[in-house]
Image (cartoon, rainbow, N blue to C red):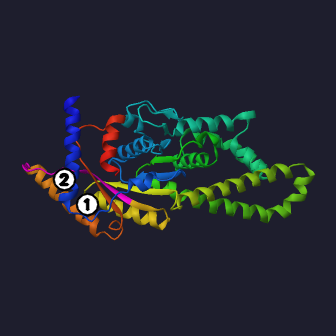
Amino acid sequence: MCSYWWNCHLLLLACYIVRSVAGTTEAASGFDEMISGTKRKYYMLGGKGGVGKTSCAASLAVKFANNGHPTLVVSTDPAHSLSDSFAQDLTGGALVPVEGPDYPLFALEINPEKFREEFQNAAQKKGGTGVKDFMDGMGLGMIADQLGELKLGELLDSPPPGLDEAIAISKVIQFLESQEYSMFTRIVFDTAPTGHTLRLLSLPDFLDASIGKILKLRQKIASATSAIKSVFGQEETRQNAADKLEKLRERMIKVRELFRDTDSTEFVIVTIPTVMAVSESSRLSASLKKENVPVKRLIVNQILPPSTSDCKFCAMKRKDQMRALDIVQNDPELSSLSMIQAPLVDVEIRGVPALKFLGDIIWK
């Protein structure tokens, strides 16, 4: 244990040296600004797979909790690793208290399998299916009967594309509306790799537009069917379905506005000092700006600390990293971001004490 903490102190010193020797134009990460105020704030950390997003997100959550903010850290990555990062079982799709921080810290690994089971159970109530119930409500029961032999419910046995993102959106809605989450003043998202995350951020726009088209189509056929439905007593059911769609649309608008709110939301890009990773980060930054998602910070992770006696491998690796850092400083999408350099450490970042150590390096 003594040697571990000695290594920690040496690495912390090395981090300061890296920052001064590299001579970058990075701005301060401004952690004081991140913890100021009691209004709830959302932080999303994302980037290419394998760059250390989970460690950075978990360390930020620990730092928030240790600075007086009841905090929730959420993994939207289908391949969860929060449990590994905290060295604690966080599986199950429910809030789990994290042991160690000064203030309440909870973690949540979104569980698509559990969600799908719940949806299947709800869809099979009274011997019907969710698809048929919905189409009945829209006044399209005859079509649903004709499609019944296709056994559409069996499609739920294999997740459709975008299910993980849809579940994440539903959780964000709960964060906004449910009393269960009202205590949290900081919510940190450990997001999936770039492609999943961009789909997550664009989903509210897609659903808003799609629901809008459905409602317009329904209005066009309403006049031709309302009299008949009134006679058979199904008008109220059909109206209830339309009301639910409208309510869902309003929720999507709230989520979209949240993602774009510069006062309450920030996306932090995490990358490593390689040309490939920096190039993907540049494209991610451009996509985020196109979606009007606030981006201020860029973490460049796993930087080799300086050494007076490099081996040939280390010297070549350091040269490649410096070239990647130069690209960051000259990239039109990344150069305006506050760059935070995090050193490559020789110990595994696992458990709250190690995450606190990493957080003290990154978040200043």
Residue receiving disc 2: 17
Q: Nearer the viewer, residue 355 or 279?
A: 355
Q: How far across and how far down the image is residue 336, in percent?
A: 35, 68
Neighbor class of circle 2 (other Cα within 10 Å; few <14, some 14-19, many 20+) is few
User: In which quarter of the view is residue 79 placed?
Assistant: top left
Taking the spot 46% from the left edge, 57% from the top edge, the residue there is: 266
Q: Amino acid at mark 2?
A: Ile
Q: Which residues are magenta?
A: 297-311
Mark 2 or 1: in front is 2
Residue receiving disc 1: 275
In the picture, measured across the screen, residue 72 lies left or right of residue 141, that is left
Taking the spot 52% from the left edge, 46% from the top edge, the residue there is: 164
Q: Amino acid at mark 1?
A: Val
Relative to residue 95, is residue 41 depicted above or below? below
Relative to residue 73, is residue 97 depicted above or below? above
Taking the spot 46% from the left edge, 47% from the top edge, the residue there is: 188
